[in-house]
Image (spheres, rainbow, N blue to C red):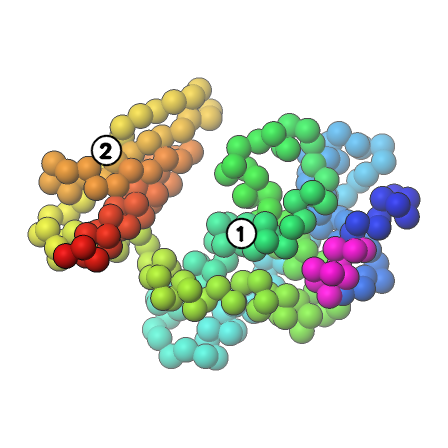
Amino acid sequence: MSGMQTAPYQEFARTKLGLEYENLDLLITALTHRSYVNEHKKSVSEHNERLEFLGDAVLELVVTDFIFRNFSEPEGILTSWRSALVRTESIGEAGDKLGYESLIRMSKGEKNGSQRARQQILANAFEAVTGSIYLEKGYDAAAKFIADNILSKLDSILESGSWRDPKSHLQEVSQRIDSQTPVYKVLEEVGPDHDKIFTLGAFVGDKLVGQGTGPSKQIAQQQAAKTALEAYEKRGKKS
């Protein structure tokens, strides 16, 4: 890549990461999707999946180390907290805030993909960037990056209770308030078999209390449970 082409990556590293890369190719590779390599085989040979593999391990270790040292809750609860911090939605949101989407090299098809696909690409790139920081500057620099962008979310996750599995949480709430267990029903299926979108409803008794959409029934159920919990919370505030 020419100096003009690499300049945005240097600027991003300097202003958003607070780092000067000696090997800028690490960061450029971290922001290169596999689809881009497939379209540019003659000029580009490496995508970000190896760095993503490394960054995922560093991310999990830093988060685990932090919550282990700072909290005395049982292993099961700490595992749920960690899962909430490192799930695709959380790290994808962190990537969105860092603003590197325009720097990700990907195919035209991927650029026009679904919101879910976009979030996954942002999350994978976050892990790959983490891996690049670890290789370039070491563990402490990677840990600071994770603390600034991921661990900073912990207070709000604990306050909102979003670390809990929504379906299990909804079952607790519905049984406590309405003495009934929620049931999930498919409301709609659209799209071809290989790319279906499901809409499911969460019912307590005969009442639809929440609705969710996703690329699988499981994801749609989780979304339906979340909206149902929000509805119960609003009911509680009014009463």
> Is residue 201 located in the magenta-colored stretch of the structure?
no
Nearer to me, 5 or 68: 5
Which amino acid does the dot numbered 2 rest on? Lys
> Is residue 13 located in the magenta-colored stretch of the structure?
yes
**Which badge, 2 or 1, is on the more N-terminal residue?**
1
Classify mark 1: helix, strand or loop.
helix
Classify mark 2: helix, strand or loop.
strand
Magenta part of the protein: which range? 10-18
Viewer can see residue 127: yes
**Residue 37 appears left or right of 213:** right
Nearest to the eye among marks 2 and 1: give it: 1
Q: Total of numbered circles in the picture? A: 2
**Residue 52 appears left or right of 182:** right
Cα separation, mark 2 vs mark 1, equals 29 Å
The residue sitting at 15% across, 38% down in the picture is 207
* Residue found at the far right of this picture: 2
Q: Label 2: which residue?
A: 185
Residue 55 on image: x %, y %: 63, 58
Depicted 13 relative to depicted 3: above or below: below
The residue sitting at 59% across, 53% down in the picture is 97
Which amino acid does the dot numbered 1 rest on? Glu
Q: Quadrant of the N terminus?
A: top right
